[in-house]
Image (spheres, grey):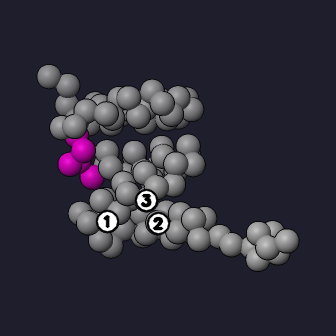
Amino acid sequence: MIQIEDIINQARAALEQNAHEKALAILSDQSILTNKEALFLKGEIYFKLQRWGEALNHFSLFLEQSPSDKKAESYCTMIRNILGFFHKDLYNP
């Protein structure tokens, strides 16, 4: 049986090759979704794909398990800033 660490390493290798969809496919197994590293890695992949909602969800789940992680908090802050962007002159002609 493949270990969770092996799955995560395969997904990281795919991510380094910019094969984002392949990395997501590797991490699609439901049994590893409780793993903190897998949650964080999926958040990073979704962030790179600019799928902000899914990235924020995965980082939030990660923060439930590791509430003091600064990197995950930074990702969440960046995503909220992106989603909350409003330029009054651009949107109000």
Q: Which residue is mark 2?
A: 76
* Marker disc for residue 14: none
Q: Is residue 26 above or below residue 33?
A: above
Labels 3 and 2: the sequence-earlier one: 3
**Callout 3 amino acid:** Leu
Measured Cα–Cα span from mark 3 to mark 1: 10 Å
Name the residue rendered at 35%, 29% in the picture: 26
Q: Position of residue 85 (x, y in %)?
A: 65, 70
**Callout 1 amino acid:** Leu
Which of the 4 image quadrants contains residue 28?
top left
Q: Position of residue 61 (x, y in %)?
A: 30, 59
Q: Secondary structure at mark 3?
A: helix
Measured Cα–Cα span from mark 3 to mark 2: 6 Å
Q: Is residue 81 above or below residue 16?
A: below
Left or right, 14 with respect to 36, comes to right
Q: Which residues are magenta?
A: 32-36
Q: Position of residue 90 (x, y in %)?
A: 81, 69
Q: Residue furthest right?
A: 93
Q: Is residue 92 above or below residue 37?
A: below
Dot 1 and dot 2 residues touching (CB under 8 Å): yes
Name the residue rendered at 43%, 59% in the picture: 56
Looking at the image, can residue 71 be seen? no
Labels 3 and 1: the sequence-earlier one: 3
Is 35 a magenta residue? yes
Q: Which residue is mark 1?
A: 63
Q: Residue furthest bottom?
A: 88
Looking at the image, can residue 22 be seen? yes
Name the residue rendered at 46%, 55% in the picture: 53
Left or right, 35 with respect to 90, comes to left
Q: Secondary structure at mark 1?
A: helix
